[in-house]
Amino acid sequence: MTNIPTQPQSNSLVQAVQQQVRRLESEKQALAQRVAEANVLYTLSALLTGRHSLDELLNGAAAMSVKVLNVKAASVRLLSEDGSHLTPKAVCNLTTRYLKKGPIPLNDSELARRVLRGEVVYVRDLQSDPRTLYPDDVKVEGIVSMLSAPMIYNGRPIGTIRVYAGEEREFTESEQELLKAIGHMMAAAIEHARLEVAEKKQQKVDRQLQLAADVQRRMMPSKMPKMPPFDIAALYQASLELGGDFYDFIGLDNNLGIVVADVVGKGVAASLLMASVRSSLRAFTQDIYDLDEVMARVNRAMVRDTLDNEFATLFYGVFSPQTRRLTYCNGGHEPPILLRDGKIISLDVGGMIIGVDPLQEYEKSIIELMPGDYLLMYTDGLTEAFNYANKQFGRERIENALRECADQQMNAETSLKHVMWQLRNFTGLRSAVDDTTIVMIRVTDEAALPVLAKEDEDLIG
C-alpha cells in the first residue's frame, strides 16, 4: 500500500523545491554576473593594452564603466604631477561644462583624499551631502549616488574613477570590487600611455640632437693644416649632451687664423648658435684684418641676432709663419697657455664675452713666438672636468702636463694626447658634463713655406 503525503508534508516538499529553484536561480545570476564582469575586464584589458591615445583610453574606460555597472554617468580625474589637485580628463554622459570646470584642490576634497589613499568611497546622495564641492553642478547633471575608486600604479596614486547613478542606489560589494579592478587596470594603462608619449618625445629629441651633432661635426676641420714652423693638433670631444664648443682654421693670405670658442647652452640651440658665430667670424675675417675690429663686429652681430641670454666666449688668433708672430684677441675666453722656457704666459688681452654689450670695445695683442714654445688653447670643459671626489682638473694640472710635454720635446699630436691622458687619469670613468676642445701648437725651428700648399688652402680657406 502506497503512502500518500499528507497536506503538511506536501507543503514542505513544495517549499524545499522552491528554495532549491531560488538557490539555483541565484547561483545562475551570480555566475552570469561573474561572466559579465570577466567579459568586461577582458574587453577593457584589450582597450587599455591597445595602441590608443591617452584621451581615447580615458573616454573608453569611462564609457565601459557606465555600461558594466549600469549607471548614468562616469568621470575620470588625473592627479597633478605635484600631487596638489585632481583634474577631470574624461566623462561619459556628463556635460562639457562638467569636464571643463577645472582642477579640484585636494585640500578642499576629503572624498578625493580618501580615494587616493586606496579606499573605495560611496556617497548615497551627492546633492545633499555636505562633502560635495559643487552641489549645484551635481543637480544640473542629474546625478545622485556616487561610487569612486582609486587608480594606483606601483603604490603611486594616478587619479580616480567615479560612476554616478541618477537616483539613490546601493552598490554591491561585487560592484565595488569591479570598479576598483577597473581603476587599477586604468592606472597601468595610463602609465604605459604616458611612457609611450615620453619615448616618442625622447626619440624626436634624439633625432634632433643627432642631426645637430652631424652638422657640428661637419663644421669642424677634418684635417690639420701643415704650416711650418707651427706644428698643430686639435681635438673636439663631445660630452653626453650636445654643446657649443668649436674650433676653426681660417686661411688668410698665407697666414692662419685659429678660433676656439664656447657658446652658452646645450643641445640644438647651442649648436645653432655655434654655427651662427662661426659664420659671422668667417665672413668678417675675409675683409677686415684688424682683430679687434673683427671681434667687435662679431659681438655686435651676435647682440643683434640672438636672445638676451645667449652669449659666447671666443679666442681668435692669427699666426704668421714668416715672422712667427701671433696677433690675438680674447673675448672673455679661457686664456690660452703659452709655455716658454718653463714659464707660463696667459693670453688674456681682449675684452668681455661676446653677445652682451654692443658697445664693447676689444683690444688686440701681438706676441713673437719662439722655437720650443708650446701654446694650448682650450675650452672650460678641460679645466672644469670633475673626478669622483668632486674636484676640478683645473688650470694648474694643465700647466704641469704642458711642462711634461716640453721636457720630453713632444710634438703637437703627442702633447695633446698627453694632456688628455692626464685628464682621463684624473677623472677616471666619470662622464664629462661639458664638451672639451683643445688646439695644441708647438713652435719648431722649421722654415716657413713660401706659399701655402694647395691642399691646405682648400682645408682652411
Image (cartoon, rainbow, N blue to C red):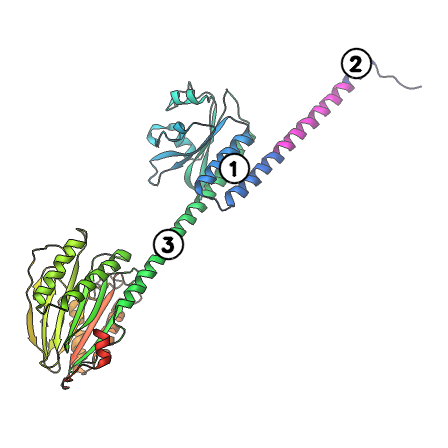
Q: Secondary structure at mark 3?
A: helix
Give the x, y percent position of residue 378.
19, 68
Indicate whether residue 285 is drawn in magenta.
no
Q: Is residue 360 above or below residue 84?
A: below
- The stretch of residues the image draws in magenta is 13-34
Q: Which residue is mark 2?
A: 8
**Mark toward the start of the polypeptide (1 vs 3):** 1
Amino acid at circle 3: Lys
Tell us which disc is closer to us: 1 or 2. Answer: 1
Q: Is residue 409 above or below residue 135?
A: below
Amino acid at circle 2: Pro
Labels 1 and 3 touching (C-beta < 8 A): no
Q: Which residue is mark 1?
A: 181
Determine whether, in the image, residue 27 is placed left or right of residue 153. Answer: right
Q: Residues within 10 Å of mark 1 (few under 14, many from 20)?
A: some
Give the x, y percent position of residue 313.
16, 61
Determine whether, in the image, residue 345 is placed left or right of residue 98. Answer: left
Front one among 172 and 368: 368
**Mark toward the start of the polypeptide (3 vs 2):** 2
Residue 173 image label = none
Q: Residues within 10 Å of mark 3 (few under 14, many from 20)?
A: few
Give the x, y percent position of residue 200.
40, 51
Q: Secondary structure at mark 2?
A: helix
Q: Residue at x 38, y 37 (%)?
A: 79
Q: Quadrant of residue 227?
A: bottom left
Q: Residues within 10 Å of mark 2 (few under 14, many from 20)?
A: few
Labels 3 and 2 touching (C-beta < 8 A): no
Indicate whether residue 15 is drawn in magenta.
yes
Residue 204 image label = 3
Spatial CA distance of label 3 from label 2 is 83 Å
